[in-house]
Image (tube, rainbow, N blue to C red):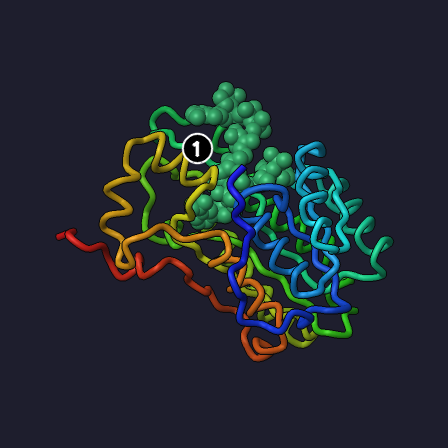
Amino acid sequence: MTDLGAVQGGAFAPDCLKGRTALITGGGSGIGFAIARALSDAGANVAISSRNLDRLKEAAQRLRNSGAQILAVAADVREPEAVNAAVSAAVERFGGLDILIANAAGNFVVPFSDMSFNAWRTVVDIDLNGTFHCAKAAYPHLKASTHGGRLIAISTLRALEGWPGCAHAAAAKAGVMSLIRSLAIEWGPDGILCNTIAPGPIDGTEGVKRLYEDTGEAAVLTANLPLGRLGRGEDVAQAVLYLCSDAASFVTGTDLVVDGGRQRGQRGAT
Ligand code: NAP
Ligand code: COA
């Protein structure tokens, strides 16, 4: 597995999240794993959750090798009771929950005319309803956090652009962005900061494999990105770390774009 979590000299104090607990859905792979690495490196206790417990355990072991406190707990975000149980497990193990990262997602390329009802329902259920279930389960604990709770959803600007081949994920992620903005306002008085992060294409991930490599678009995409490279897991993870840190205590209701300038256009494109 590509090590997306290897941070080369992060800019934050190594213990800036000491005493806090984070739950990261989809934390056993890809961008979620990079986030788990960054938050645990910053001193947080970290719970990682998804469907595949074997993969989670392996990821947890890799994180523990650097001395971090890690819990691996299986849950399908489509099932509210499973999400509640995962949140409870993190709270029981670590004594509270300060940070929830809604990162779990499902996506695949399919033209809308070929998209089955169940294909649409599945992606919306994982991405949008899954984020709702996480927010619901986490709320009382984030409210009780003495550090100020943080809810961060991983989205994508493609949700707002019109996304041919991924209409289901586009609609779901746009819904996630809207949900987070509403919660930022409703939960501000509770001291809970709610933001999204919108990554560009991140190297070595399932997302890039499905959307760009399998479709033969990877080379053109990379050549035309303003910074001339795909993102790294740690690029996203450091942005998450910022939003979780005290440095971001006045930042809520925003979409932090971490895309190497892709939203401003592509080199060579007319
Ligand atoms: P990934 O490794 O496939 O991450 C998705 C994670 O979600 C997996 O760990 C998966 O684990 C988990 N998951 C899927 N369905 C689930 C379910 N029903 N319940 C619980 N967990 C579930 O892909 P990735 O590319 O790193 O994507 C991570 C996030 O970044 C996603 O939100 C994606 O939309 C976003 N994003 C990615 C890119 C990119 O370039 N990769 C760009 C923009 C945004 P299990 O299989 O064990 O459940
Ligand atoms: N093209 C068209 N339809 C597809 C598809 C594809 N590539 N992959 C799945 N589907 C359809 C299935 O045919 C099914 O519809 P049907 O019942 O009408 O036949 C529906 O989607 C659900 O598929 P299923 O495999 O039963 O779902 P699942 O719950 O087991 O898995 C997925 C969820 C489909 C999202 C799966 O790809 C997954 O687990 N993804 C997680 C990782 C990921 O997507 N990472 C990238 C994040 S950007």
Q: Is residue 114 left or right of residue 136?
A: left
* Amino acid on which disc 1 is placed: Phe
Q: Of residues 129 and 212, which is closer to you in this image? A: 212
* x, y percent for residue 251: 54, 75
Q: Residues within 10 Å of mark 1 (few under 14, many from 20)?
A: some
Residue at 66% over, 55% down: 135
Q: Dot 1 corresponds to which residue? A: 108
Residue at 32% over, 31% down: 215
Q: Is residue 40 left or right of residue 167?
A: right
Q: Quadrant of the N terminus?
A: top right
Q: Quadrant of residue 260?
A: bottom left
Q: Quadrant of residue 3?
A: top right
Q: Is residue 79 left or right of residue 115?
A: right
Image height of 269 relative to 14, above or below = above
Note whether residue 22 is visible: yes
Q: Is mark 1 within 8 Å of ligand 2?
A: yes
* x, y percent for residue 57: 72, 38
Q: Of residues 235 and 122, which is closer to you in this image? A: 235
Residue at 30% over, 57% down: 262
Image height of 206 relative to 132, above or below = above
* x, y percent for residue 45: 75, 59
* x, y percent for residue 86: 77, 46
Note whether residue 116 is visible: no
Q: Of residues 83 and 249, which is closer to you in this image? A: 249
Q: Secondary structure at mark 1?
A: loop
Total marks shown come to 1
